[in-house]
Amino acid sequence: MQPTGHLRGDAVRVAGDARQRFHDSRGYGRPLDGNEIALSRVEAAHLLFRGDLSGVALAPDADPVGFERFFVECAAATDRFAVRYLVYADLRDRGFYLSPAREPWPGGGVDAPEAVDFVAYERGSTPDTGNVKYPVQVVGERESLPAAGLAGRTLAVVDEESDITYFAATEGSIAGATDYEPPARLDGVLLADRVVVWDAPEGLYERGFYGQPLTGRAAAVEGAVQLSLVEAASLAADGVLSLSASVGTAGAADEAGDPSDAGTPEPDGPAAAIVARGREVEGDRFDRRLAVYQRLREADAVPKTGFKFGADFRTYLDVETVEDLPHSEHLVRVVEGDHRFSPRELSLDVRLAGGVRKEMVFALTAAAGGNGGGDGTAEGGAARDADVEWLSIGRLTP
């Protein structure tokens, strides 16, 4: 004869030999006085589904109900009960013991964020030993979740057909070994959405992997390299790049310099001019991308556009020469610090990165106050002072 549970508040109490039968041997619930235990609603539903409980009385002196009635009542009374139950049952079937990640349950003693639903213990480990393998946050397909603070969690996304996809969110880290110092001085022309350096030294592209050469069959022009605006802004902030001319978006020379007057310096500083153009082209997003680009270069990694992969950057960690270029290791997407992911968006990014054998990294950026000054130095400093949090997310099979 299987025991019967009694719902009391948010817990189901089971007496008899429940402690030995459910807690000590299989990690369910938490001990009370004697041999009685308290089960969370999800735990009780799982035991009902397995036939290990004969029923649960929903009120004093009420007749016990079976799994179907109990499940429906809990889904109506408890937020996200159905999706949490599905994840709990799936991880139990995979051989894990789990506890709710809140007091007074055993998992409540774990240092886990409030958004975490369960802690799953290492296989062979019980709530008493406390060896946590996965802090599990359950997410429905149509929910959203904040990007900030996700590192260290296991995301269990339940789609509309009740399938579960697991993601591991960790603190990202990108550290390269590219040894290249740009030349002391470069002169460029600021066009509508890029900068051309007409006499770039060979190493700028071949060893530093900056820009893209202007090439073609029977080309009469040699040494010309087109820089993206983020590349150019970074070089200008480092004091490397000067502008001999600036062509406005309408196609004519603007007040920053005339193409016929190649020796006239930018009055507001080249970094300020390039950043201003970047903001004209893509708004505040340019500042965020510039901050991330500079962080990657400072880490001796080489960031290049990730457009073909739907990302902001792809990264190369160790570039010796473009002729012997390794595969890129990461896809980096830049998002605001208060960005909220939709699970579908997250799944798409991670799936694509995995399909091309790269790690998906999100760069969470927060401005460091102001848009910088007008002398060029402050513009580069504002980007460098911006806070950047790296978040790596990948598929997980528990």
Image (cartoon, rainbow, N blue to C red):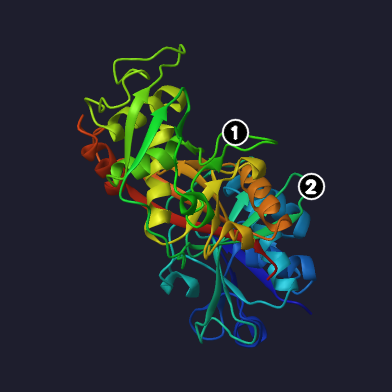
| Mark closer to the observer (2, 1) | 1
- Tell me if residue 338 can be seen: no
| Percent x, y of residue 367 | 31, 40
| Percent x, y of residue 386 | 31, 46
In the rendered image of this protein, does residue 101 appear above or below residue 2? above
Numbered mark located on residue 161 in the image: 2
Numbered mark located on residue 324 in the image: none
Q: Residue at x 37, y 45 (%)?
A: 291
Relative to 245, 339 lies left or right: right
Which amino acid, mark 1?
Ala
Q: Residue at x 37, y 22 (%)?
A: 246
In the rendered image of this protein, does residue 140 appear above or below residue 36? above
Judging depth in this view, the residue of 145 and 121 nearest the camera is 145
- Tell me if residue 305 can be seen: yes
Q: Residue at x 36, y 44 (%)?
A: 235
Quarter of image, res 124:
bottom right
Mark 2 crowdedness (10 Å alpha carbons): few <14, some 14-19, many ≥20: few
Q: How many marks?
A: 2
| Percent x, y of residue 214 | 58, 36
Judging depth in this view, the residue of 83 and 219 nearest the camera is 219
Per the model, the C-alpha gap separating discs 2 and 1 is: 61 Å
Which amino acid, mark 2?
Glu
Q: Which mark sits nearer the N-terminus, 2 or 1? A: 2
Mark 1 crowdedness (10 Å alpha carbons): few <14, some 14-19, many ≥20: few
* Residue, disc 1: 220
